[in-house]
Image (spheres, rainbow, N blue to C red):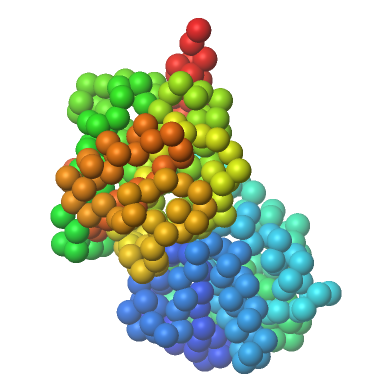
Amino acid sequence: MLDQKLVFEALAEQGVTYFTGVPDSYLNGFCNYALANFPSRNIIAANEGNAVGIACGHYFATKEIPLVYMQNSGLGNVVNPLASLAEHDVYAVPMILLIGWRGQGNTEPNHPQHRLQGEITPGMLDVMHIPYSILKDDDADFRAVIEKAAAYCRENRRSYALIAPKGVMAAAEKANNVDDVYPMSREEAIEVILDHMPADTVYSATTGRATRELFFLRERRNETKAHDYLNVGSMGHASSVALGIALEKPERHVVCLDGDSACMMHMGAMTMVSKLDAPNFLHVVLNNGAHESVGGQPSAGHKVDFTKIAEACGYATVGKAAETEQELIDAIEQLKDCGRAAFIDCRIHKGLNSKLPPIIFDHRAAIDELIADLNEK
């Protein structure tokens, strides 16, 4: 990994001292250094398009070049603001884009959700006419690349991208930041939900640890995985998939096991229940206040009142977050057959189960098994 102290010194030499984006495990060295050393100059955004907007506002107010960081899966969220806001022929906002390159070559053979994204990452930048450099794990080379990138941004009022392959901006091991703010872990909360919903309930588990924990809980409990959708990519869309299933299968309970960061990434999806009838849909946010799967950086999860937001969007709730196992059980029992789409903000503590291996499974076989289960006569 690049020496992050030198990385930030090189950026500062070029006047780049403002950072915003969505954390990525391939950038966790960068993200954690920014969090620890520049807390007032580092804005963790709800999604990558949000970050580009914040960066544009920063440039308008200061004329300083901002840096926007993201995983390459977030490129889809920035196409519109880059092409129609920051674009040179519109408002001409220069910014440096730091992009973690998931799925490069065959670096993640067990994660097909990154394969196409990795393949098309450079091409997406080409299509948007954004020049880029592929970073090396070489401190001297990084300084030269930053000098080139910043000069291009200043002289042309355009964006320049830095693509970070695996190991360049991240340590080999992610930190496991455990706290005791709330008694339940995510895995314990998921098991409580499994215990108190009907056996044929359909589950849509959000990107990250929730998918892995549901997968291995099924194995430990000797239960079928045929009822489960694992949202291994497309962060923020697990609840929409769950709602789509719930609308077509009103006889089945459908639970979204969402994350706080994922829910906030596309929070507009919550408003759909205000105009659709889905009384079999239960949306549970497993809220640890962190982007845990990519390094534990803080989210706004423990700062916002999801329950009030959900109520305003049309969900039934119990009026407050569930903070203990018994409160979660009580909420499930009150809401699972309440006659409306329902929502639970389940407060949990941070911490990863280090004993769980990565998920290795056949994605097509898994989804075909769920499709068969949903279409049984």
**Residue 156 showing in the rendered view:** yes
Q: Position of residue 144 (x, y in %)?
A: 56, 80
Which quarter of the figure has residue 275?
top right
Using residue 17 as the reference point, say whether residue 282 is left or right of it: left
Q: Residue at x 46, y 59 (%)?
A: 309
Q: Residue at x 69, y 53 (%)?
A: 123
Q: Position of residue 326 (x, y in %)?
A: 17, 45
Compare residues 272 and 16 and report the one nearer the observer: 272
Which quarter of the figure has residue 205?
top left
Compare residues 51 and 345 and report the one nearer the observer: 345
Q: How many marks?
A: 0
Most extreme residue toward the right is 89
In the rendered image of this protein, does residue 250 appear above or below residue 273? above
Q: Position of residue 191 (x, y in %)?
A: 23, 37
Most extreme residue toward the front is 339
In the rendered image of this protein, does residue 58 appear above or below residue 215? below
Which quarter of the figure has residue 56?
bottom right
Q: Residue at x 51, y 74 (%)?
A: 20
Q: In which quadrant will I find the N terminus?
A: bottom left
Q: Residue at x 36, y 69 (%)?
A: 303
Compare residues 14 and 374 and report the one nearer the observer: 374
Q: Position of residue 137 (x, y in %)?
A: 44, 67
Using residue 297 as the reference point, say whether residue 376 is left or right of it: right
**Residue 164 showing in the rendered view:** no
In the rendered image of this protein, does residue 137 appear above or below residue 92? above
